[in-house]
Image (cartoon, rainbow, N blue to C red):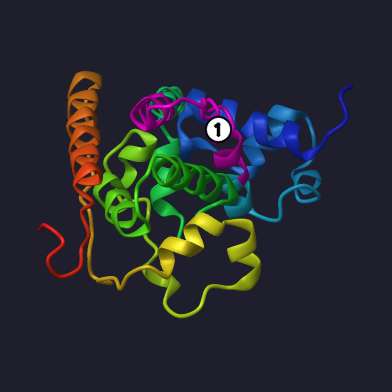
Amino acid sequence: MTRLNRERVLRAAVALADEGGIDALSMRRLAQELDVVPMALYKHVANKEQLLDGMLDVVLGGIDPPLPGPDWRDVVRQRILSARRVLLGHRWAYRVIESRSVPTPAVLEYLDSMIGAFRDGGFSADLTHHVMHAMGSRLLGFSQELFDDSRGAGPPDPAMAERYPRIAELAAAAAHDGDSVVGGGCDDQFEFEFALDLLLDGFERLRERGWTSGPGGGR
């Protein structure tokens, strides 16, 4: 019999959610699937919320890593479409992302790397900041705000800044409207890619112009 560990618990939970939906998942149902008593699960996940966080990180771990290349658009587009394929394979995952008050480590890692793709492509921190908000959850293939750094008012936590330097850089770059909300909903593949390409082309034009949100910056 395979020994119970955190990875086995999380992967079994992902499989159950894929099969029956996130609402059908419970600690008792998961314990039955693993042929253990429910209390055995709590050695690996403290509660249902920690289970959901871990499941989400397992799913996002399936996104292709960024491929280096001279064209930032190719790098960003490939990563976003990979994320969309992953989330379409786990249709419950976007609901978990939406429900989190604090992004999981895998979401933060993903956002940090996407910020890096824009910055390495020649985007200023100012333009990248607005690009991330314009993209919202399209970064992960669905239409819901992801990059909400309005909670980060004031100096960033040193430990967080060290682990996620690109996020910390943007969090300190501009003020935020705390009431701003980007609407939800999903697009089919053609509409998603159509809108994605429009956005990426528009971002490139702004980058070439040296656009800035400051006075006289071209708005």
Q: Residue furthest top?
A: 190
Q: Position of residue 106 (x, y in %)?
A: 57, 44
On screen, 47 above or below 32? below
Q: Residue furthest bottom?
A: 154
105 left or right, relative to 85: right
- Residue at 66% over, 67% down: 159
Count of numbered circles on the image: 1
- Residue at 34% over, 52% down: 128
Q: Magenta segment, which residues? A: 54-81
Q: Magenta span has 78?
A: yes
Q: Position of residue 112 (x, y in %)?
A: 50, 49
Q: Position of residue 169 (x, y in %)?
A: 47, 63
Amino acid tagged 1? Val
- Residue at 59% over, 40% down: 57
Disc 1: which residue:
59
- Residue at 88% over, 30% down: 3
70 left or right, relative to 156: left
Residue sitting nearer the eye, 147 or 35: 147
- The rendered magenta stretch, by its main secondary structure, is classed as helix
Residue 151, by quadrant, is: bottom left
35 left or right, relative to 76: right
Q: Magenta span has 184?
A: no
Residue sitting nearer the eye, 206 or 198: 206
On screen, 129 above or below 35? below
Quadrant the N terminus occupies: top right
Under circle 1, the secondary element is: helix
Q: Position of residue 160 (x, y in %)?
A: 60, 64
On screen, 207 above or below 72? below
